[in-house]
Image (cartoon, rainbow, N blue to C red):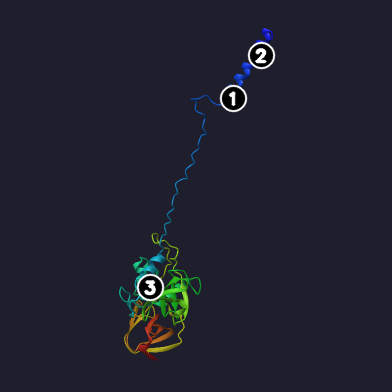
Amino acid sequence: MPGSARLRAYVIAASAAAFLISVGPAASGVAAATPTTIAPIADAARTTTKVTVVPTRADQVIAIAKSKLGRPWVFGATGPSVFDCSGLVIYSFRTAGISRVVGSSREVSAFALYARFRALGLASTTGGRPGDLVIWGGGTHVGIYLGNGMAISTLVSGVRVHAVRAVTTPFTAFLHTGIAATAATAAAVIPHVTKPKAVASTSVKVTSHRITTAGLRLRAGPSTAARVLGTLAPGTKVGVVASAKDGSGRTWLRVLVDGRVGWVAGWHTRAG
């Protein structure tokens, strides 16, 4: 082979060898590239949402009433150890700081509460909510509604939780206090209840007459716990407007006397 041909062959062979070396394995002592490991992204820290349940005024009233379970019934008592039916209501609302919903022991009875709430359009046979009042017997018995058809009231056997329909005296109405959705830390939106007053004689109709057989107090409601409007001397003739029974089954008479209307103990009167 001529010299020039041998030279070209040598150059081609050397170039091929150089190409093979450049694409071959890495030379000893040179670390091969390793894949980059991507660390998994850590989950964001879990946050626990703390739900704060704010008690309502109804929760407070109900808890106070339930703390008196088993306490005995005593006519006219408003606690803290013994109660009658309206007495438990008065005590529970007063202790919760919202006594003006129901008034004071001097002016409150089951009948008076029923009359007031009914006059305000806040009495109905449906839609009871926790913290509302429950009236039985047209105003002879009162308790506090717990919800789900249950109530708490002072029966003759003491303070008890019972079904609304379990009382011997028939259910009459719920009195809507508006405290079921009112936070205990907020000012309660409470229906204004006007104190009872003697009404003008032109607004009532006398159906019969009675004569008092003892000195009697003319009261704002059919209960010895109701506010005193005045005193009647024995032998006073009164016109009977209506009647009602109290928690002891005694008959009270709503009467007209000297241009005033109020309630007297019917068992201390006679036909006139």
Picture coordinates of residue 209, whole percent (x, y): 42, 89
Q: Residue at x 42, y 76 (%)?
A: 162
Q: Is residue 250 above or below residue 123?
A: below
Category of crowding for the residue at label 1, using alpha-carbon neighbours closer than 10 angstroms: few (below 14), some (14–19), many (at least 20): few
Label 2 or label 1, whichever comes before in sequence order? 2
* Circle 1 residue: 23
Element class at badge 2: helix
Element class at badge 1: helix
- 3 vs 2, front mark: 2
Give the Cα separation between the discs numbered 3 and 1: 97 Å
Return the residue found at the far front: 1
* Circle 3 residue: 89
Q: Given the image, on which type of amino acid does mark 2 rest?
A: Ala
Picture coordinates of residue 164, whole percent (x, y): 45, 76
On residue 152, the disc is none
* Circle 2 residue: 9
Residue 6 shows in the view: yes
Return the residue found at the far top: 3
Picture coordinates of residue 226, whole percent (x, y): 36, 77
